[in-house]
Image: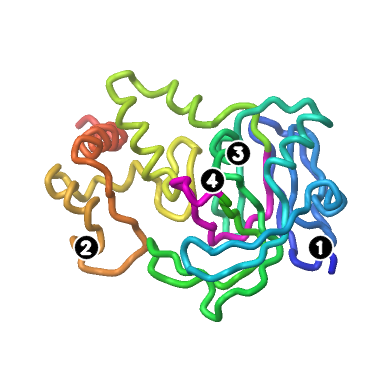
Amino acid sequence: MKLGSLFMIYSFFALLGCQAKRPAMTPEASVQFLYQTQSISLGPLKNKTWQSFTQVDGISGAQLSYGGYSIEALIQLARSQWNFRGKAIRFTARDGYVVNYSLDDLLKARAFLALEVAGTSTKGIYNPELKTHFDWRPGYLVFRDSKMSAGKSSPYQIISLELLDQTPTQEFLAKVPDHLKNGAKVYLKTCNKCHSYQGLGGSKAPPINFMTIKRKNNSDLKRFLRAPQDVAKRRFEMSPFTGSDQDLDKLLKFLRSLEPKPANP
């Protein structure tokens, strides 16, 4: 079965810092593999990068048989063919979700892009943060090393992998004042997956600088971050902050610095 039959690519993505446009993808294309001005369908690379393995899914507990692309093999290919010496990969999903991973983390976790999944449970994969099941569609990022903290399969349908010459967080942190950097690091670790700021981060939640205004009291804001649904008394998609009190204080200081300043009378 051709990989192209698994995906319909509805849009393409401009490269970070590059204005060059690429032609629209055809229905025969699979996940896009992007670097600088190059855009290559992964389908023709199957004989060099395709792998299969079986393991127990860390979230659903189901024994799953995966077929897809080893991230390490893709990196080796990029290094040999394009002299790639970058530090990160940006993954973009069909629903607009964007996440950046460092190559070190991906290689340590033995990351794998699953395009074929057999032996799935009838309910699919359970996401404990969102408290719901996701159906099995191709394009999940799987971490083969269960010892890694990120040892979970990802419930998002990935449509592109973009090789980045530097980790986007480096540029982000360079703009943060020194007295707020520790809080910014906590934010990148715990909030950036869903919230964006200055163009960096996910798109599944509002921009982070609009999130704190309703909680003028710091104690109320802390309670909200620890148990958002309980404090708001309604169900919505937001994971509670589970870090230390010290990290929460650092995060709070950083978040308060992002609030829009009141206009002068």
For marks 3 and 4, give the CA distance.
16 Å
- Name the disc covering residue 99, or none: 4
Q: Main secondary structure of the magenta part?
A: loop
| Residue under pointer 3 | 107
| Residue under pointer 1 | 4
Callout 3–callout 2 Cβ contact below 8 Å: no
Task: State which quadrant residue 55 falls in.
Answer: bottom right
Q: Earlier in the sequence, mark 4 or mark 2?
A: 4
Q: Label 3 neighbourhood size at 10 Å, few (<14), some (14-19), many (20+)?
A: some
Q: Position of residue 196 (x, y in %)?
A: 44, 43
For marks 3 and 2, give the CA distance.
39 Å
Task: Identify the element where label 4 is drawn.
Answer: strand
Task: State which quadrant residue 218 falls in.
Answer: top left
Q: Earlier in the sequence, mark 1 or mark 3?
A: 1
The magenta stretch is 145-162
For marks 4 and 1, give the CA distance.
23 Å
**Dot 1 amino acid type:** Gly
For marks 1 and 3, give the CA distance.
26 Å
